Image (cartoon, grey):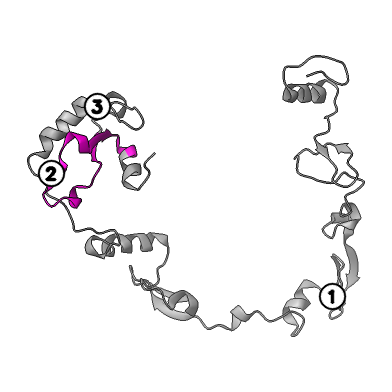
């Protein structure tokens, strides 16, 4: 890439832009105006209009810091600064809070909170009715209480992934497991990590689940098992077959 100011050759466009900014003290254009199609520079590379075409800049922008006006409160005569708007009346912040009818009612303020107890630690809580109705697990102080309650209650047959509990693999499993590790050179067949890298032997995973066999020993064949590290084993068990 050739520098448009001095003609120096740079290997990449990024390098040429950095050179121009540092050496010539001027960044090169990186955007094209959507309206006038002129090139311009934007530090964040996000704007779609140049300075001339951007109609909401400066005092045209409602959030312009120099756009505040000074006025006297219609209620207490206090002087304050504000951003002009089309709303009727001009009130300072204190009068707006206190005066009835100046602000729309907040429907959430009219809802009465319900007292209840944390389902784990039994601490007293106040909750909106909407957060209690239909919540089969109850209410909790925080995520910590919720997590502890789940650990104590959503286990075993109460868990949605429960499939009958621990299986008895039988004595035939261990010789097959050892042969599978030897066949796979004690290496994860998914990511390639070996036992030295892992600090332990890989797991041995059943391609077809043991619980799908009437006799668990029929699942223990070398054609139905593969060596996987702990991380890959979890991924495969969760359905990631890549």
Left/right placement of residue 73 relative to residue 140 reads right
Residue at 86 percent across and 57 percent down: it is 61
Q: Name the residue under label 2.
A: 218
Q: Where's residue 9, x and y in %?
A: 79, 14
Give the residue drawn at x 84%, y 46%.
Answer: 34
Residue that carries the numbered disc 1 in the rendered image: 87
Q: How dense is the environment of label 3, judged by Cα within 10 Å: few (below 14), some, or many (20 and up)?
A: some
At x 87%, y 36%, the residue is 39
Q: Mark 3 points at which residue?
A: 184
Q: Is residue 169 visible?
A: no
Q: Nearer the viewer, residue 196 or 152?
A: 196
Residue at figure coordinates x 80%, y 34% from the top left: 30
Label 2 or label 3, whichever lies nearer to me, is 2
Q: Earlier in the sequence, mark 1 or mark 3?
A: 1
Q: Which image quarter holds the C terminus?
A: top left
Measured as percent of width and height from the top left, residue 229 is found at 30, 34
Please provide percent x and percent y for residue 224. Answer: 21, 38
Farthest residue to the top: give it: 8
Q: Is mark 2 on a helix, strand or loop?
A: helix
- The mark closer to the camera, 1 or 3, is 3
Local packing at callout 1 (Cα closer than 10 Å; few below 14, some 14-19, many 20+) is: few
Say which quadrant the N terminus sits in. top right
Above or below, 53 relative to 226: below
Which residue reaches farthest left?
Answer: 171
In this rendering, the answer to whether 158 lies above or below 228 is below
Question: What residue range appears in magenta?
Answer: 203-232
The mark that comes first in sequence, 2 or 3, is 3
- Residue 66 figure quarter: bottom right
In the image shown, does 34 or 104 lie closer to the viewer?
34
């Amino acid at each position: 890439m050739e520098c448009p100011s001095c003609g120096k050759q740079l290997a990449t466009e990024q390098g040429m832009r950095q050179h121009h900014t540092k050496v010539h003290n001027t960044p090169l254009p990186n955007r094209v105006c959507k309206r006038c199609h002129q090139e311009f520079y934007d530090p964040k590379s996000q704007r779609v209009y140049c300075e001339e075409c951007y109609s909401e800049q400066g005092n045209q922008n409602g959030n312009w810091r120099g756009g505040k006006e000074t006025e006297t409160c219609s209620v207490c005569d206090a002087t304050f600064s504000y951003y002009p708007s089309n709303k009727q009346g001009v009130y300072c912040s204190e009068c707006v809070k206190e005066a009835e009818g100046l602000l729309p009612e907040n429907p959430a303020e009219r809802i009465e909170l319900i007292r209840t107890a944390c389902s784990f630690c039994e601490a007293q809580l106040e909750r909106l009715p909407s957060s209690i109705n239909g919540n089969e697990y109850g209410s909790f102080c925080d995520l910590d209480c919720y997590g502890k309650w789940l650990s104590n209650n959503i286990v075993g047959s109460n868990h949605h992934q429960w499939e009958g509990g621990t299986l008895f693999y039988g004595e035939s499993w261990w010789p097959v497991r050892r042969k599978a590790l030897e066949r796979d050179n004690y290496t994860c067949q998914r990511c390639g990590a070996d036992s030295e890298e892992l600090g332990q032997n890989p797991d041995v995973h059943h391609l077809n689940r043991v619980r799908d066999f009437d006799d668990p020993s029929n699942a223990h064949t070398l054609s139905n098992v593969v060596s996987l590290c702990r991380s890959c084993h979890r991924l495969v068990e969760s359905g990631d077959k890549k």
